[in-house]
Image (cartoon, rainbow, N blue to C red):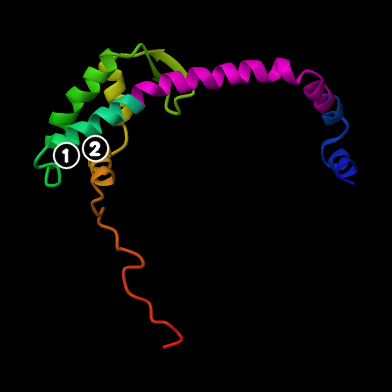
Amino acid sequence: MVNSMLDMMLGHWWRPLLDYYFAHFTWISIPLVAWLAVLVVSHLAVKDAEKSMRAALDGMPDAKKANGKTLTRRLEPVIRETASRHRWMPAGPGGIWIRRCDPDDLVEHMTHLPNYLLRFRDQHLGLATGQKRRGSKRRRSLAG
């Protein structure tokens, strides 16, 4: 039934395509798995930089009250130092390929979102982001 529906919508071209896919699954999946491994290796620079930033935030006595400029002044050197230890970083806006890790490029890649450092700090320290808390009121039980 599904085959006849696909034949009506797509025509008969999809059957040889699926047959080729199933017959050569290994040859199709090996490059995709290799590409996935490359992406994982490139994102290690970002993950290591975030780990170093968390340690730096834990060491800052005024981290909860710091504004964006203070966080930028204190955390960008941490990102640059981490970038100097890595060889590869994500390339492009979605990070779907790799390039050589440059400290300035890694800072730009990590902070291209507005208020990234403030959001990172709030997430790490568990601070409110100005949103209303949900579920903070006690619910009344129906039994009582």
Look at the picture and state if 59 lies above or below 142.
Answer: above
Can you name the residue that lies furthest to the front here? 144
Q: Which numbered circle lies on residue 68?
A: 1
Look at the picture and state if 122 lies above or below 73.
Answer: below
- Cα distance between the residues tagged 2 and 1: 7 Å
Amino acid, disc 2: Leu
Q: Position of residue 64 (x, y in %)?
A: 15, 46
Residue lying at 78% horizontally and 18% vertically, measured from the top left: 24
118 or 84, nearer to the observer: 84
Residue lying at 84% horizontally and 40% vertically, measured from the top left: 6
In the structure shown, which secondary structural element does the residue marked by tag 1 occupy? helix
71 or 86, nearer to the observer: 86
Q: Position of residue 87 (x, y in %)?
A: 36, 11
Q: Position of residue 35 (x, y in %)?
A: 55, 18
Q: Earlier in the sequence, mark 2 or mark 1?
A: 1
The segment highlighted magenta reads 17-46
Q: Is residue 82 left or right of residue 2?
A: left
Q: Position of residue 7 (x, y in %)?
A: 88, 38
Which residue is the site of mark 2? 117
Q: Is residue 125 left or right of residue 74?
A: right
Q: Looking at the rendering, which quadrant does residue 124 occupy?
A: top left
Q: Main secondary structure of the magenta part?
A: helix
Residue contact between numbered discs 2 and 1, judged by CB atoms under 8 Å? yes
Residue lying at 80% horizontally and 24% vertically, measured from the top left: 22
> Is residue 21 shown in magenta?
yes
Q: Looking at the rendering, which quadrant does residue 82 occupy?
A: top left
> Is residue 95 shown in magenta?
no
Look at the picture and state if 57 lies above or below 100.
Answer: below
In the structure shown, which secondary structural element does the residue marked by tag 2 occupy? helix
The number of numbered badges drawn on the structure is 2
Quarter of the image that includes the C terminus:
bottom left
